[in-house]
Image (tube, helix red, strand yellow):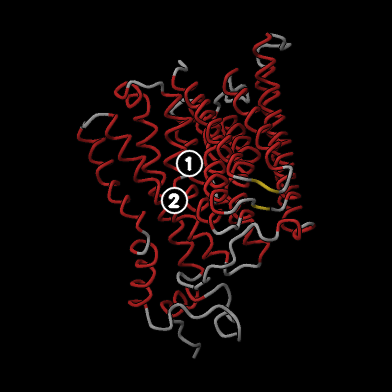
Amino acid sequence: GPPVKDPEGDVAHLMRGVGPSDGDDEGGPPDVLADGWGPYLQRSISTLILEEKLNLLMLATPFAIVSRHAGWGDGLTFFFALVAICPFAERISFVTEQLALYTNDTLGGLLNATFGNVTELIVSLFALRAGLLHIVQVNLLGSVLSNLLLVLGTALFFGGLKHETQHFNRHAASINSSLLMLAAMAVVFPTALSLTGAQLHSNSILLLSRVMSMLLLVVYGAFLYFQLMTHRHLFEGMEDDSEDNDFVLGFWGAIFWLGVITVFIAVLSEIMVAAIEGAADSWGVPDIFIGVIIIPIVGNAAEHAAAIIFALKNKLDIALGIAVGSSTQIALSVIPTCVLIAWAMGQPLDMNFEGYEAATFFSTCMLVTIITTQGQTNWLQGLVLIVAYTLLAAGFLVHK
């Protein structure tokens, strides 16, 4: 008769790799289930949760949920949710790297680009659903500003203290800078139109923003093709190849954990967005300050630490890839995507970020462009970026 299929065997086989021959080919991915399900689960949970000290912050997750339902106050609820989301944001990048091990370099790069800022996108989607349009804008703006000024600034400062002059690939930095300037123009133009009252119709800025968003996404797609296909040599050295790329999770295991972590991020994002206005009142700061300064600093804590560590090791290209590369992704893909998703949801999200916000974005891109054109940096330039961030943060603290 026909051979009897073993469903558990199928699942186990899929856990081992992408296709039927992957685990068996010489030089292919190792069989992560060679020891059976028990050791696999023990190993994957240990790697995902127990090995990183930052993951202790995950313990704040139940407190965030209890605080919301027990009425402990928005300030405390927001704090717990914000602290808990930080390690999940870092773990999602680890799982994406695990998934990328089973693909080629191009697909791996595309995966990292797609999931690199998934936390910002999820927070923005919940804020959109709640109708907090300006919070969406300032949260994404805050991620760009903190990466370009605070993350890059601290990396250059501490790296510069250890190494007198640090060199990096100025061609890649120049391309990223030009893309950031393009994104800044896409924010400044609608904002200027609004401030001068020169728009032709009442919905002109909204229409302009949607067209600009589509164009920015086209440019982002072209940039990915440029980076991953036609000009890969320009971006060599911008990724960390020194780590031991152990096949821990398996292909389908990585997809499963990606789903689990995304669910946790979604739950915490929803709690955080619901509590943001109440938290601003109880802390006595503007909600815009929480959106632009506090959420990005905590949310990007793992990136901050990684950029500083690589700068101290004199691997400035990787530090720049983390700070400037992440900002480019948000400015060219996440912001336009949010505008188009809002359009589908019937929400009038546009690229008019208001005067002060647009000024901070444009001047930040200008400053980073000036600093990264030379192909070498020192600690003083890092200090300039940190002070610039302090100046704009002070402005947001008194922003109504």
Task: Using the rendered view, name the quadrant where residue 383 is placed.
Answer: top right
Task: Using the rendered view, name the quadrant where residue 236 is placed.
Answer: bottom right
Q: Of label 1 and label 2, which has the lower sequence position?
A: 1
Residue type at numbered disc 1: Ile
What residue does disc 1 label?
122
Q: Nearer the viewer, residue 397 or 21?
A: 397
Q: Quadrant of the C terminus?
A: top left
Task: Using the rendered view, name the quadrant where residue 338 is placed.
Answer: top right
Mark 1, Cα crowd under 10 Å, few <14 / some 14-19 / many 20+, is many
Which residue is the extreme one toward the right? 230
Q: Please say if 180 is above or below 207.
A: below
Q: Are marks 1 and 2 in contact (CB under 8 Å)?
A: yes
Residue type at numbered disc 2: Thr
Residue 175 x/y as whole percent? 74, 45
Residue 224 x/y as whole percent? 71, 51
Q: Nearer the viewer, residue 150 or 190?
A: 150
For marks 1 and 2, give the CA distance: 9 Å
What residue does disc 2 label?
262
Residue at horizontal 50 percent and vertical 73 percent from the top = 247
Residue 281 x/y as whole percent? 32, 21
Q: Nearer the viewer, residue 4 or 201?
A: 201
